[in-house]
Structures are given as structure tokens and as C-alpha cells.
Image (cartoon, rainbow, N blue to C red):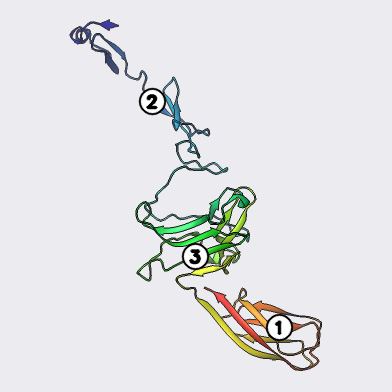
Amino acid sequence: MSKTSLKQLAQDGATNGQAVIWNNTSAKWVPGTMGITTTLTAFGGTPNANAGNITSGGVLQLSPADAANPGGVSTASGGQSFAGPKTFIAPLTVQAPYVAVTDIYFKAGSSTADASVLAGAKLFSARTGIGGTEVEYFSVLRSTSTAGTVVCSPPSSAAADICVKVGTSTADATINVATKLFTVRAGIGGTEIEHVSVTKQGLTTMGEINATGSFTTTFFAGIATVLLGTASTTITHASFTATSRILITWLGDHGAARSWVQRAAGSFTVTLSSAASVATPFSWEVSSLA
């Protein structure tokens, strides 16, 4: 009921849970829950400018953020986009349970079609001083062709420091050697063009690598011979792996129609399609990019 003063309102008293609404001229008792949200329902699926909705019954439903609206973080399988710069105070860890060859644990780049990305655009850039005086240490550029350019320099003044860490918390032994721990692409979600990737086998790039810092390469070389009447020879070393890069240069005509290399942990074997008609030497080079 309405009253003309707070004094009169107080004389009437109220039941438990009621509240007073006063507009400087009159007052009245109302239910304590009138107009107040009392229930939080399940997370919504449709983004909106208010980041949620409140029903007439006082039920609050939060909405997910997207490229145009604020909101919460969704677990929907279709993925989610966020607009505006974001800062993570603690390290960001990407975890996935997959171990297949085609798996990608971390994908960075642009959803813009590759042909529409400017030649000098940076698909990925690792920096210090973000938001202030920024210093770039690593970047992947979209070049004038389908190849990319990787640019990097020493990340810090301390040997153990890491500026950017990407990958997975899954144990190394359970991940396929060809699984992509990191890939930079243009055209994400459409026709994707990969410009650089990192697997357990090493770094792969479609373009040149420009390094202000350094890359470590394990390199071995030597000369061996396929003996007369034999069709293969094996070179062994504890540092050789099943993914080592091997270059063979024949130093004579072995007489066979073709030859090939088979890699294994600790060795590689050079094989001829038929026995050598003469003892034939070859030079070999084995490298692994670390």
C-alpha cells in the first residue's frame, strides 16, 4: 500500500522479507525479491551486446563472447572468437589428448584467405614490452610468394629465459613424431596455407629463415663404399635418428638402375636395385636441426 511519509509506513510494520520503495514523496512495502535476480541458469549459446539476459522472472543467463560482443568463455565445440587485445598474466598452456600425425596443438595466423593477406603482413610476432616500447624477437611473415619468412633473434639476457612457449603438456613419449606442436597459417578455417610448423622432427618452413640469433644443427659427413658384387652398405652412429636428413652423392657409376636410403635409429643404409658392377664410393652428409 502507499503511504505519504516514512513515519506512517513504519507504524504499519511489514512482514518478513519485505522492502521499502521510497521516491521522496511516498513509500510502500514490496516483496523483497521484486525486480531482483535470484536465479542463474545454464550458460547461453547466443552472443549479445549485454553479455547476457535477465528474464521477467529474475533469471540471469550469461552469453558467450564473439568477435562483435562481450561475454563469457564458451566450451562449445564450434570454437569461439574474441575481439580486442588480451593479456595473460600466467603462462598459456594448450593441452589436447591427440597423438595422430595430423594433430595440431597450437595454430596461429589469420582467417583471411592467403591470397588476400598483404605480402609484408606478420602472421605471428613474439615481443617484449607489449603495449609500451615493443621489441620484436620472432616473427613469421607472409612473403610475396606462397613461402613465408621466419625472423628471430636472441630472446633474453638469461640463458634459461623463454619469451614464447607453445606446445602441449602431454608427455613427449606419447606424441607422434610428426604431430605439429606449432603451426602458423593464413586462411584459418577456410583454405589454409601453412607457412611454418614445428614437430618433434624439427622446424619446417615454406620460405627462408633469417636469424639474428642462431640455430643448432647436428651435422655428420663422411665417405663410404658399396663393394663390388654387393647391393648395400650401412653407416652407423649413435646420433643418427629415423628422421635425420641424409644427402648422398655418388663418386662413381655403380651400374645399378637406381639407389635409395633407408633411415633407422643409429644408422642408415644405402641400397642398390642390383649388385654393384664395381666398387663405388659415395659421400654422405647427415644433419638434424635442433
Q: Nearer the viewer, mark 1 or mark 2?
A: 1
Q: Percent from the top left, x then y, of residue 28? A: 28, 10
Q: Amino acid at mark 2?
A: Thr
Report crowding for label 2: few under 14, some 14 to 19, many 20 or more residues within 10 A (C-alpha): few
Q: Percent from the top left, x then y, of residue 43? A: 48, 34
Q: Amino acid at mark 1?
A: Val
Q: Percent from the top left, x then y, of residue 267? A: 63, 82
Q: Can you identify the residue that label 2 sits on?
A: 38
Left of 225 or right of it: where is 237? left
Disc count in the image?
3
On screen, residue 76 above or below 286? above
Mark 1 and mark 2 lie on one chain; the one further toward the N terminus is: 2
Name the outermost residue toward the left. 7
Identify which residue is drawn at 32% across, 18% down. Answer: 32
Identify which residue is drawn at 54% across, 53% down. Answer: 109
Mark 1 and mark 3 lie on one chain; the one further toward the N terminus is: 3
Q: Percent from the top left, x then y, of residue 24? A: 23, 12
Q: Judging from the image, what secondary structure is the residue with disc 2 in?
A: loop
Question: Do residues under tags 1 and 2 come within 8 Å of each other at their CB atoms?
Answer: no
On screen, residue 110 above or below 36? below
Q: Judging from the image, what secondary structure is the residue with disc 3 in?
A: strand
Label 1, label 3: how many angstroms apart (C-alpha)?
36 Å
Identify which residue is drawn at 47% across, 35% down. Answer: 69
Residue 270: mark: 1
Residue 151: mark: 3
Report crowding for label 3: few under 14, some 14 to 19, many 20 or more residues within 10 A (C-alpha): some
Question: Do residues under tags 1 and 3 come within 8 Å of each other at their CB atoms?
Answer: no
Q: Amino acid at mark 3?
A: Val
Quarter where residue 246 is shown: bottom right
On screen, residue 4 above or below 251? above
